[in-house]
Amino acid sequence: MNKYTAGAFESYDAEDIDGLLKDRATEAKKYFIDTLEELDELCEGVELPRDELNYIHYFCGESGHDEDQDEAFARIREKLYKLVGRLVRAYAELKPRMMDLGYTVSEQSALDNKVAFYVNLRDTIGRASGDFIDLKAYEPGMRYLIDNYICASESQKIGSMDDFTLLDFIITQEDKLKSEHKGEQESAAETIENNIRKKVVERMVINPAYYAKMSAILEQLILDRRRGVLAYGQLLDTYMELAKNVAKPEENTKYPESIRSNGALRALYDNCGEDEETALKLHKAIVKARLEGFRNNPVKANKIKRALYQLLNDDNEVERIYQIVVEQEEY
């Protein structure tokens, strides 16, 4: 390589080609070390003894206390996810060259453990914050695409990986909730609460009144847990009931039969004083007045608003209900 480069660049001054070609192993080591140092620096602020709960508080906030700083915590989590992804890629590049670079077996083992720690931390924080992807939410859309645009021979099932839902996730935390270790109990409880809260926030625009109630129930639950009113071992059923009402409102028995199965009707019912008759009348008027593309067309939107005004007789109420209407998939 030296002979080749000497001939290839012989007409250039030394300073012109300095650094043009670099040793791959040396660069891989430098990139890995720099990334690892960035991660260590990011986690420096985690309080001792730096157990799971300390990391959750640092990256997600403390349940019931730091909700107003959600955006700040989201930014620091995003940095964690990016750095860990970069660390894994850098380590994959470095690993085959470690012996050549003079790493001992014990040093390699220590770095293996360090990388594994940060990968596990990323997964733990992703679950605790609710940043994990709920695949079931995408199922209807994916099924539509597959049925309409993809042709394939019948597949052979070689394994099973079920969708990971909020309810499934809560069940996985049961052992920690019932553990005798206080730290594990708190970690599991806050992880579940963060996931429920994220789901509530995501759906608030769809049905403000309903999810405001779910939010209030969650906050009271957190308060009761902190005061010791509810024992950790007894929390699972309470969490499951709340999560079910958040994720599957169509199964909430508080709704009349005529309302329960339709998301738009549920939203109208909840935000119009839980009046079944009014909700049904509004729904019928909206369906009759609705035209394709009304969300981006003021003329078509006004047609729906006029229909709403005939029933509500209040401009402010019309605007409030219309903002809920535009969020409904059924319309």
Image (cartoon, grey):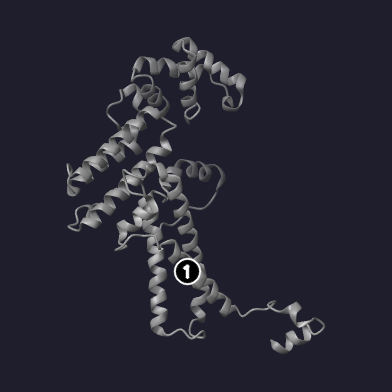
Q: Report the quarter where the N terminus lies.
A: bottom right
Q: Tell whether 175 sits left or right of 57.
A: left
Q: Position of residue 146 (x, y in %)?
A: 51, 46
Q: Is residue 158 visible?
A: no
The part of the image, by quadrant, that contains residue 223 is top left
For the residue pair 253 and 215, the one nearer the viewer reads as 215
Q: Tell whether 105 sits left or right of 306.
A: left
For the residue pair 150 and 19, the one nearer the viewer reads as 19
Q: Position of residue 247 (x, y in %)?
A: 35, 39
Residue drawn at (52%, 81%) of the image: 97
Q: Position of residue 98 (x, y in %)?
A: 49, 81
- Amino acid type for the residue under numbered disc 1: Glu
For the residue pair 121 and 43, the one nearer the viewer reads as 43
Q: Residue under circle 1?
A: 37
Q: How many numbered marks, from 0 up? A: 1
Residue drawn at (36%, 45%) of the image: 66
Helix, strand or loop for disc 1: helix
Q: Position of residue 45 (x, y in %)?
A: 39, 60
Return the residue found at the far bottom: 3
The part of the image, by quadrant, that contains residue 118 is bottom left
Determine whether 120 is above or below 153 in the image.
below
For the residue pair 59 and 168, the one nearer the viewer reads as 59
Q: Tell whether 319 sits left or right of 267.
A: right
How packed mark 1 is, by other alpha carbons closer than 10 Å (few <14, some 14-19, many 20 or more), is few
